[in-house]
Image (spheres, rainbow, N blue to C red):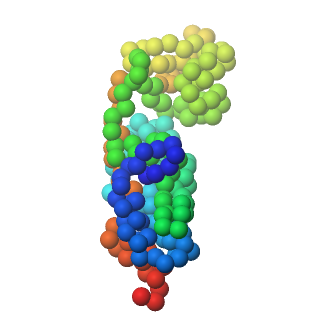
Amino acid sequence: MESQETKPVSNQVADELDELAKKLSDTARLEKAGITAAEILRFHIYDGKGFTPLSKATEEYRGAGRPLQDTGSLRDSITSELKDKNTVIAGTTKIQAPLMNDGGTITARKNWLFIPAKGTRQLERRYGPKPKDVLDGLRNGGYRVFRIGRTVCYRKKDKDSDTRVAYYLRKTVTIPARKFWYLSDDEMRQIEREIFPDA
C-alpha cells in the first residue's frame, strides 16, 4: 500500500499496475485501471473471504460482525491516484493497514496494552477513545477505578455496586493476517477487460 503516511504492504499490487500501465496509451484508461483496482481491493475487505473470524474478546467489545468492517473506515480509505501519464497507484492513509493485511504482534511500549472489555465501547463514546479518557471520565463521574490482577475495573463508590471490567491488561497482542491487498490473475483480467473492452 502506498501513501505518504504508510509503507507498502506488498509490492504485488504496484507491480501489477505498472505492468498494465505499459500497455496503455492514454491517461483516461490508466486512471480507470486504478479506480477499478481500488474497487477490487475494497471488495476484498467487504467479502472477507478466508479471514480469521473475530476473537471472542473483540466480539464482546464491538458486537458480532465481520473482520475489518467495524466502522468501514479502512475499506473507505482505499483510493487510487493518477500520478503522471505513466503511473497510477492504489493506496490507503490508514497506518494500521499493513498490520491488518499481514498480521503481527503488538507489544506494549511501556507497561501494558489496554484491551477494552464488554461495555467499554459505550464508555469510549461517552468519555473519549483513549483508556485515559475513559478512566478519568469514570473517576469524575463518581466511580472508583482499580486493578484486580490483569484487569482494570470500576464500580460506583457505594458498597453494593457491581464491579465491572473496563480493560484487560496484556503485554502483547497478536493480530491475525487478513489478506485483502492483492490482485489475482482473474482480477487483473477483469481490469484489462474493462479498459480494453474491444480486445
Residue 15 % position (x, y): 36, 62
Residue 100 appears in the picture as rendered: no
Q: Residue at x 35, y 23 (%)?
A: 171
Q: Which residue is drawn at 61% across and 18% down?
A: 136
Q: Which residue is drawn at 59% across and 24% down?
A: 134
Quarter of the image for residue 17 reads bottom left
Residue 54 % position (x, y): 39, 45
Would residue 28 appear left or right of 175 to someone viewing this image? Answer: right
Above/below status of 85 relative to 50: below
Residue 41 % position (x, y): 45, 61
Which residue in the rendered view is the most extreme toward the bottom? Answer: 198
Q: Which of 193 and 56 is in front in this view?
A: 193
Quarter of the image for residue 183 reads bottom left
Quarter of the image containing the C terminus?
bottom left
Residue 188 appears in the picture as rendered: yes
| Count of marks placed on residues | 0
Quarter of the image for residue 84 reads bottom right
Would residue 31 appear left or right of 180 to someone viewing this image? Answer: right
Above/below status of 57 relative to 156: below
Above/below status of 87 relative to 178: below
Residue 180 % position (x, y): 39, 56
Q: Residue at x 65, y 31 (%)?
A: 126
Q: Nearer the viewer, residue 124 or 154?
A: 124
